[in-house]
Amino acid sequence: MPTQQAPTSTFVNFPGMDEVLCQLRATEGAGREHEPLFRLVGERLALKTYDRSAFVFILIELVYEFEEIAGHDLSDLLSRMVRALTDDPELAESGLDAYEEIKASLEPNAEGDDELEPAPPVEDPSADDTAVRFLDDAPAPAAVGPHVPAARGPDQERLMIELQEAQKQVADLGLSARMSIDMSLSRPSREGVSHSLREIAALRSILRDFEALLGAAETRILEEIGVLDRD
């Protein structure tokens, strides 16, 4: 059953992964070919609370990337997904409008591309002979054995997992904070400003954590090449 939200609510609270997937799979026009998209959406939304505009832009980002791979228009599916997850027709319509505007802004200018097309290179009849002579004189490349990657230890595995989780949090909080700041600047209110400040503080906190993890990774790299001694 779709997540019920009051029209005046600024945020959307999402259920667990299974329920999000159930809602998306029940969307009109959904098919098995959309399952990878639904799983990406579920991973980003499950058990999280997002500002309504930030949530829509997360969907727009994922749907646009998937549309590039699928090769067909998914704008109608986007609006139905918003409706299925929020039961808010106005939010679904505004999300569709935003998606169409973003797509239009990203479309290449065909006329401009033609004007900027470089002139064909002038062929040099002596170029082929020069290249052949150069290749004949060049020494044979040294034989290189197959690269065998070093096995990851438990500490390295944990570091990579923590980096991956922090990267995802930075992406999610960065998008949410940016949209919250944009809304506060365009339609300032005490509640909106307070929310933006909380979003900024949360983003700064995860950025500090990410910086600490990057420092740990840098130390590990320098240890591996012998610049630093291991503890």
Image: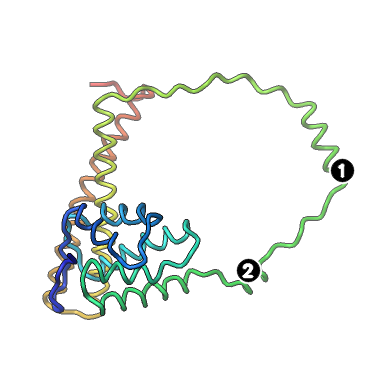
Where residue 163 appears, as percent x and y from the top left, is 27, 41
Where residue 111 appears, as percent x and y from the top left, is 63, 74
**Crowd class of label 1 (few under 14; some 14 to 19; many from 20; radius 10 Å):** few
Depth check: give the residue in front, 96 or 115: 96
Where residue 90 appears, as percent x and y from the top left, is 26, 80
Amino acid type, residue under disc 2 in the picture = Asp
Q: Which residue is mark 1?
A: 126
Q: Which mark is residue 113?
A: 2
Depth check: give the residue in front, 55 or 186: 55
Q: Are marks 1 and 2 in contact (CB under 8 Å)?
A: no
Where residue 51 appears, as percent x and y from the top left, is 20, 67
Type of colouring: rainbow
**Quadrant in which the C terminus appears:** top left
Question: Could you say whether the residue bearing mark 2 is in a helix, strand or loop?
Answer: helix
**Does 203 sit above or below residue 141?**
below
Amino acid type, residue under disc 1 in the picture = Ser
